[in-house]
Amino acid sequence: MPEDLAFREHIFEAWRRVSRRYGFLGYDGPPLEPLELYTEKSGDEIVGQLYNFRDKGDREVAMRPEMTPSLARILGERSRSMPKPIRWFSTPQLFRYERQQRGRLREHFQWNVDLVGEANVAADVEILAVALDGLRELGLTAEDFRARVSDRRLLSALLRSAGVAEARLEQAFQVVDKVEREARDRSRERLEREVGLDREGANRVLSLFDAPGREALEAEFGEDAEVAPLLGELGEYMASLEALGLGDFVEFDLTIVRGLAYYTGIVFELFDRQGELRAICGGGRYDRLLERVGGEPLPAVGFGMGDVVLGELLQERKLRPEFARGVDLFIVTVGDDQRPLALKVARAQRERGRSVLYGLRPQSVRKQFQHAGNEGARAVLVLGPDEVGRGVGVLREMAGGEEREVSLESLMDGTETP
Ligand code: HAM
C-alpha cells in the first residue's frame, strides 16, 4: 500500500544517505542465482529455507535468500582490475522459505554494506559504524538498540581449549548460536550428541557463557598464545568505536556466532535494547568467501540489515513518519468557463516542479474542496468569474485557512509557486 511503501522509502533513503556518507557505491544483482551458489557457501540453515526450482533450461536455480554470495560472485569476475578496498552497498529484495512469524517473513528487503580488500580491523570498525549510523539516521538512540559483538576465531580457540575437535567446530557454533534461546539441558544434550563431547566437556563449553565478559576472559586466558592477540584486537576495535563516538552502542557478547557458515573473524548483531524483537542486523568478516566462489582471494567484511524488524522497532518508538501525499496545490473552478485557465495554471506550476491536481469532471465548489481535502492538498486556488475578470485567483492555505489574492500572471510565469 502507498503508506507502507512511503515508510519503506523513508528507511531506504536513510540507508542510502549513510552509505554515501561513508563512501559506499550502490550495486545490484539478479534475484535468481544458480542453486549451488548457496548450497556450498551459506550453510545448512539457509539452504533449508531456499526457494529453489529447476528452470525451463533444466538448470537448478534459487531466488536469492541473501546478497553476500552474489556479491562474491560478481566481484569474483571483476575485482582484479578494481582499486581496493571496494566499498559497495545494495538494498536487494530477498526470499526465504521461513515459518512466518513476527519479524520473519518470506520476502524482505535488506541493506547490504560490504568492504572488500582490507584485512585490517579498521575495516571491521568502519562497517559496524555504518550499521549503527543507519539506525541513528532514523532517529534511534543508544537507549533503543545495541550491537553485540564477538569473534569467531576467539570462540574457536575457546571451544578447542574446552575440548571441541577442529572438525566439529561448525556444529559447536550452531549450538552456541542458540545457547541463549535454548534451555541449558538442551544445549548440553546437543553438545554431546552433535559435537561429540562427554558430559564434562559439554559443561566446560557451557561454563564459557556463565561469565562471558571480556574482562573475565582476559583474566582466564590472558596468557594464552592464541587467545591473547585476539582479545587485543577486540580491544582495539572497541577503542576505535569509542573514538568514533559510538562506544555506548557496543557490547562484547560471546554468544554471537551468526548462523551463516562463511564468517571467519569479528561478527556482530544489532538488537533492540528491550530484547523483544529478533535481530535487526547481522554481519561480520568473511575472508575466504571470494576465493571459494573462484575469485581473487580478498578479505571482506559487511552486514545485512532487514526492513521488517527495523520497521517494527521504528513503529514502536513512534518514529514512523506520518504519511504525507505531498500535493502542493488543488485548483477549484467555480464554472466551466475557468477550466482552460485551470489547465494553463496547472501546466505552468507543474513545469516548475509543483504537484498540482484539479477535479476531472464538473463538480460543485464544495465537492471540489472535499476532493482537495481527501488528496491532502496544502493549498487550494479558487478560480471564479469575478476574480478571473480582475486577473487574480484566491489562494487558500488548507491548514490555517488564510486566504489571499494572487495574480494569474505570477502563477503563470512562476514568480508565485504556492
Ligand atoms: P542474516 O543474519 O541472515 O545475514 O540476515 C541479516 C538481517 O536480515 C537479519 O538480522 C534480519 O533483520 C533480516 N532478515 C533475515 N531473514 C529475514 C526474514 N525472513 N524476514 C525478515 N527479515 C529477515 C545475511 O543475510 C548476511 N548475508 C549479511 C551479510 C552481508 N554478511 C556480510 N555481508
Image (spheres, grey):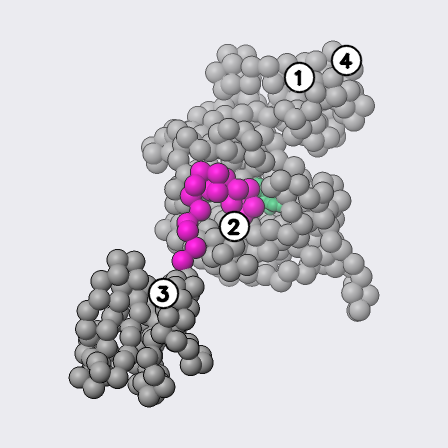
- Please provide the residue range marked out in magenta: 299-324
Disc nearer the start of the sequence (4/1): 4
Do the residues under discs 2 and 4 have CB atoms within 8 angstroms?
A: no
Label 4 sits on a secondary structure element that is: helix
Disc nearer the start of the sequence (1/3): 1
Where ligand 1 lies, by quadrant?
top right
Mark 2 Cα-neighbour bin, 10 Å: few <14, some 14–19, many ≥20? many
Q: Residue at the spot x=70%, y=13% of the render?
A: 203
Q: What residue is disc 2 on?
A: 111
Q: What residue is disc 1 on?
A: 206
Disc nearer the start of the sequence (2/3): 2
Q: What residue is disc 3 on?
A: 377
Query: Between tags 1 and 3, which lies in front?
Result: 3
Is residue 319 one of those drawn in magenta? yes
Q: Position of residue 132 (x, y in %)?
A: 43, 39
Query: Between tags 4 and 3, which lies in front?
Result: 3
Residue 272, relative to residue 368: is it above or below? above
Query: Between tags 2 and 3, which lies in front?
Result: 3
Q: Amino acid at mark 4?
A: Arg
- The quadrant the C terminus occupies is bottom left
Label 4 and label 1: CA atoms lie apart by 11 Å
Q: Position of residue 338 (x, y in %)?
A: 32, 85
Q: What residue is disc 4 on?
A: 199
Residue 345, relative to residue 258: is it above or below? below
